[in-house]
Amino acid sequence: MNKKLSTLILAAAALLVSCSQDELQNTVNNNEGMKPMTISVALPDGMSTRAVATDDATDAHCFLQILDGNGTDLDGGYSAVQKMSKTSGGYTATVYLKEDATYDFLFWATSESNASTPADLRNVSYTNGETLVWAGRALDRQWSADGVTCKLEHAVSRITLQTTGNLTVNDLQTLTLAVPSTFTAYNVEEMAPVGTTKQNYTYSFGTINISNESLSNPVAIGHFYALVDGEPQTLTLQYNGPLDNAPKEISNVPLAPNTHVVLSGDVANSGLTSGNITATVDNDWSDDTQNF
């Protein structure tokens, strides 16, 4: 009896394998000989572990574009950008590929809640300010039963401003930080900003009221993102306070993608003799900072 049962179980298992193979072959046949493959994407560790920042990646959207191995569009509109599905561990998509062909996979993710699908990930528009974006690529890949995985990196620099003293910012006492050289488009295939045209970007901080007589630790008063190319820049901090502050220049700041720059000092006295501002840069967006 046991021998007959074992035989039946083995036969059923063989039938299931045969059905699974038949289903896969039917899928291939129905897609002009192309085989399904899973693409998986993960974002890097967010900024939520840092005391100076909140996590801007809560509702990120991720997009995928497939090119041939030479970086050109595939026939039949197959290189159209598509939105990936969000999962507990990141994002995923199922694509159909020719088994013997070579492909480039481009990925772009944005924290913009109502983001529309970009037309081309080789020229993605970007607005400097409050939108966090990531990029990644997997080049010269062929179909694999294991699929393709990619971990994205921040495509922008994050700039955080901290104060070590009392500070009031409102409609009359305004606070701005200017970055002289930023870009407005990104090429994921090159993992770099598009073109050579740069523009000044000035970020305006919102209402702030810090009135403690003494601060034991610097207090973060805001942050923003800038699309930059890694060249050192001179940032200009301008506080229009009651002391008629002059602009405060912070020179030789190496802004770069995937870099977190923290500016810290007595902001209310910036541009005055006592208002020193220092900067640290964190290439890995972690807790290991380097003075410059």
Image: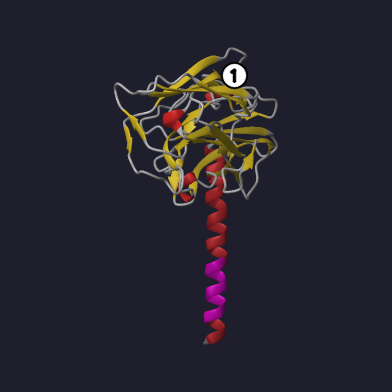
**Element class at badge 1:** loop
Against 290, residue 123 (above or below) is: above
- Residue 159: percent from left, percent from top: 51, 33
> Which image quarter holds the C terminus?
top right
Instruction: Estimate the x, y position of residue 130 in percent, counting from the top left.
Output: 42, 30
- Which residue is at the front of the view, 43 or 166? 166
**Which quadrant of the structure image shows residue 151?**
top right
Instruction: Residue at the far front: name it.
Output: 273
Question: Relative to 14, does residue 249 appear above or below in the rendering?
Answer: above
Task: Say how many tags the image has.
Answer: 1
Q: Work out whether 5 lies above or below 67.
A: below
Is residue 182 visible in the rendered image? The answer is no
Majority secondary structure in the magenta region: helix
Q: Is residue 258 magenta?
A: no
The residue shown at (61%, 15%) is 195
Residue 11 painted magenta: yes
User: Is residue 227 or residue 93 the one in the foreground?
Assistant: 227
Indicate the quadrant where residue 204 lies: top left
Looking at this view, is 76 or 153 the one in front?
Answer: 153
Q: Which residues are magenta?
A: 5-13
Relative placement, left or right, of 87 versus 122 is: left
- Seen from this angle, which residue lies furthest bottom? 1
Residue 193 on image: x %, y %: 59, 22
| Residue drawn at x 57%, y 41% as measured from the top left | 28
The answer to whether one can see residue 270 in this image is yes
- Point out the residue furthest to the left here: 171
By what rule are the colours in the image chosen? secondary structure
According to the image, label 1 marks what residue? 194
Judging depth in this view, the residue of 141 and 238 nearest the camera is 238
Mark 1: few, some, or many residues within 10 Å (few <14, many ≥20)?
some
- Identify the amino acid type marked 1: Val
